[in-house]
Image (cartoon, rainbow, N blue to C red):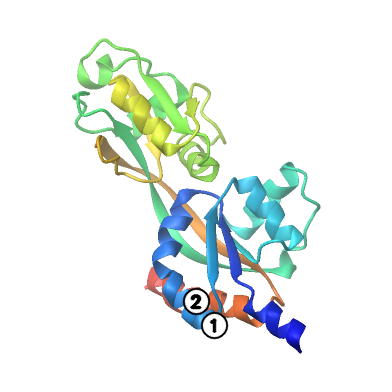
Amino acid sequence: MAAASANAAEPVRILSGGPAGMKLLEPLKPQMEEAAGVPVEIKVTRFDAAIKGLAAGTIEAMVGPTLVKTLEAGEKVGMAKQNPDDFQSVQIMSNKVWALINPKNPTKNLTKEQLTGILNGTIKSWETINGQKAPIVVVMPKNLEATMKALTMHYLKSETSPIAEYAPTQDGVLKRIEMNPNEIGFSGVGSGTKTFTPTAFTTDARVDLYFLMKKNTRREAQKVFDYLKDNVAKKLKD
C-alpha cells in the first residue's frame, strides 16, 4: 500500500513540444493540481522528445498536433509504431500564426497572395509590396516545427518553405527582425520582447493543439485530462 501511495503522489508530468502549449497550461496549473490531488509539472522540450517520452511512459501527457500527426511524426524520428487506440486526445487550443516585421518596415498589410509569394520565393523584393527596393528575407523559429508546418501547408501545400532561414527560437527570430528591417519572421505569438515590439499581422493559417495521453493511465493523470476536457476544450467548442 505504501508503494501505491507513493506512486499516486508522484507529479503528473506534461511536456509541451513548443511554447504555445506551455503558455496555455501554466496559468491552469493550480486548477489541474486541485483536480488531480498531486503536483503537476509542465516543461517545454523538443517535439520529438515529447513524443518519445509519451510513448515510453516517462511522461504521462504532451501537447502537440492531432494524435495521428503526432504518431506519424514520432515514427519519423525513430519511435516504434504505436496503436492510436491506446491514446486519448482533446483539443485545447486553436492558435494563430503571425507574420512579424520591424516597425521601420513601412508595410501596412499583407494579402494571402503576397504571403504565398514571400514564402515560396516568387516575391523576392519589398518593392512590389511597399515600394522599397530591398530583398525579402524569411526567418522562422526552428523550435516551432508544428506551427511553421501549419503555415507552409496552408499557403504552399508543402511542409517547408524553400527559401526560409531559421533561428533557434522565437526570440531569435525577433532579434533578427530587430536588426534587419528587410526580414520577415513567422511565429505562434504576435508579441515581442521588453525592448522590441514588432509590427504583427495575423495570417489565415492556424495550428490546433491537442492534449495527448495514453488510455488506462493512473487516476491522477486522468483527472488532469478530464479537467481540460470539461473546461478548456468545452469553451473552445463554445
Q: Residues within 10 Å of mark 2 (few under 14, many from 20)?
A: many
Identify the secondary structure beneath mark 1.
loop
The percent coordinates of residue 96 (x first, y second) are 38, 49
Residue at the farthest top position: 133
Residue at the farthest right position: 80
- Residue ID for mark 2: 33
Q: Residues within 10 Å of mark 1 (few under 14, many from 20)?
A: some
Q: Is residue 128 above or below residue 172?
A: above
Residue drawn 69% across the image and 85% down it: 5
- Residue ID for mark 1: 37
Residue 73 vs residue 23, the one in the foreground: 23
Residue drawn 29% across the image and 26% down it: 178
Q: Quadrant of residue 11?
A: bottom right
Confirm whether residue 218 shows in the render.
no
Picture disc at residue 105: none
Identify the secondary structure beneath mark 2.
helix
Residue drawn 81% across the image and 52% down it: 80
Confirm whether residue 164 shows in the render.
yes
Q: Is residue 64 above or below residue 158?
A: below
Q: Amino acid at mark 2?
A: Glu
Q: Are marks 2 and 1 in contact (CB under 8 Å)?
A: yes
Work out how far the residue at label 2 is from the one at label 1, CA to CA, in angstroms: 6 Å
Quarter of the image with the C terminus in it: bottom left
The percent coordinates of residue 141 (x first, y second) are 47, 35
